[in-house]
Image: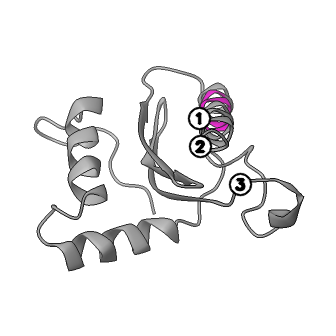
């Protein structure tokens, strides 16, 4: 079921707003430590995998072949012409908050761009985690 894409009233988020929320969550300071951990656990179970995690390797394979284990706690959002994926990447010992919002873009193009951004973030964190 899709929500009304043209709700009454003002309906807007910003990357900065979501980034602040995710930072509080990632540092166990959103509501409480326990609540933050529960929210992250729920976000790690996200079933829509066609945006930020689309091009990432399976998190369940190749740990012994030099690939860095990873997880992504994320939340997607979509209505025609608008697609978002925001989350916390965990790669090795590193963590990165990503907030990617699109507007007035073709749905297939926006999915491809979000997937490319996710891959670039993973590659950066994987390469960086080897030097930690």
Instruction: Give the foreground label among 2 and 3.
Output: 3
Count of number-bearing discs: 3
Instruction: Give the foreground label among 1 and 2.
Output: 1
Q: Could you say where residue 98 lies in the image, as x and y percent from the top left?
A: 43, 38
Residue located 26% across and 59% down the image: 25
Q: In this view, does 15 lie above or below 104?
A: below
Residue located 86% across and 63% down the image: 62
The foreground one among 124 and 41 is 124
Residue located 64% across and 41% down the image: 122
| Residue 124 in which image quadrant | top right
Q: Could you say where residue 57 lies in the image, as x and y percent from the top left?
A: 78, 53
Q: Name the residue under label 1.
A: 121
Mark 1 and mark 2 residues within 8 Å of each other at the beta carbon: yes
Residue 17 seen anywhere in this rendered image of the structure: yes
Q: Could you say where residue 48 lies in the image, as x and y percent from the top left?
A: 59, 59
**Separation of disc 2 and disc 3 at Cα?**
17 Å
| Residue 79 in which image quadrant | top left
Instruction: Give the foreground label among 3 and 1.
Output: 3
Q: Does the magenta stretch include residue 111?
A: no
Q: SS class of the residue under badge 3?
A: loop
Which residues, given as a range, are shown in magenta? 113-119
Specify how the rendered protein is coloured. one colour
Q: Mark 2 points at which residue?
A: 52
Q: How crowded is mark 3: few (under 14 residues within 10 Å), some or many (20 or more)?
A: many
Q: How crowded is mark 1: few (under 14 residues within 10 Å), some or many (20 or more)?
A: some
Residue located 49% across and 36% down the image: 80
Q: In this view, does 39 lie to the left or right of 90?
A: left
Label annotation for residue 68: 3
């Amino acid at each position: 079921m899709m929500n009304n894409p043209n709700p009454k009233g003002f309906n807007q988020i910003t990357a900065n707003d979501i980034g602040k929320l995710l930072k509080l969550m990632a540092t166990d300071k959103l509501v409480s430590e326990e609540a933050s951990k529960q929210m992250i656990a729920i976000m790690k179970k996200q079933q829509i995998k066609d945006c930020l995690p689309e091009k990432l390797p399976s998190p369940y394979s190749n740990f012994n072949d030099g690939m860095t284990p990873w997880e992504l706690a994320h939340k997607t959002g979509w209505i025609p012409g608008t697609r978002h994926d925001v989350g916390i990447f965990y790669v090795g010992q590193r963590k990165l908050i990503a907030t990617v919002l699109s507007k007035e873009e073709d749905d297939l193009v926006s999915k491809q761009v979000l997937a490319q951004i996710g891959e670039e973030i993973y590659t950066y964190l994987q390469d960086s985690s080897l030097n930690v």
